[in-house]
Image (cartoon, rainbow, N blue to C red):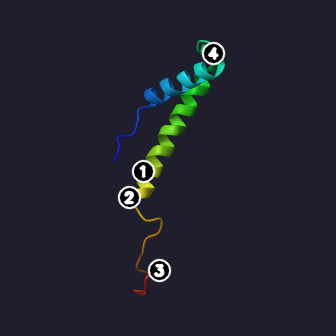
Amino acid sequence: MAKIKSKKAYETELKDMIESRTGKSFDPFLLPQVKAAAGLMRMIEKIDEQLDKEDLTYMEVGATGQAK
């Protein structure tokens, strides 16, 4: 599997996207939103990778020995 990008890498990617979209240099006013979005993007990638490795359900043995 590919290594998960760092939060800083996501921030750089988002800043580049904003500059490309607006045609202007990055406005520091947007930094809190970019940092929050970068953290969420990293978290989503980690969760998605974990879901690919594991099942969404698991079997457990109940008090009387039944599978549930």
Discs 4/1, front? 4
Residue at x-position 57% and y-position 26%: 34
User: How many angstroms separate mark 2 from mark 1 (CA)?
Assistant: 7 Å
**Of marks 4 and 1, which one's residue comes earlier in the chain?**
4
Q: Mark 2–mark 1 contact, CB under 8 Å? A: yes
Residue 53 in the figure: left or right of residue 14: left
Hey, what amino acid is under mark 4?
Gly
Which of the two discs, 2 and 4, labels the residue nearer the N terminus?
4
The disc label shown at residue 66, or none:
none
| Mark 2 and mark 4: Cα distance apart in space | 40 Å
Sequence-wise, the earlier of marks 3 and 2 is 2
Q: Earlier in the sequence, mark 4 or mark 3?
A: 4
Side of 18 relative to 48 (left or right): right
Please, what secondary structure does the residue beneath circle 3 have? Answer: loop
Q: Which residue is mark 3?
A: 68
Mark 1 falls on what kind of element?
helix
Q: CA distance from mark 1 to mark 3?
A: 26 Å
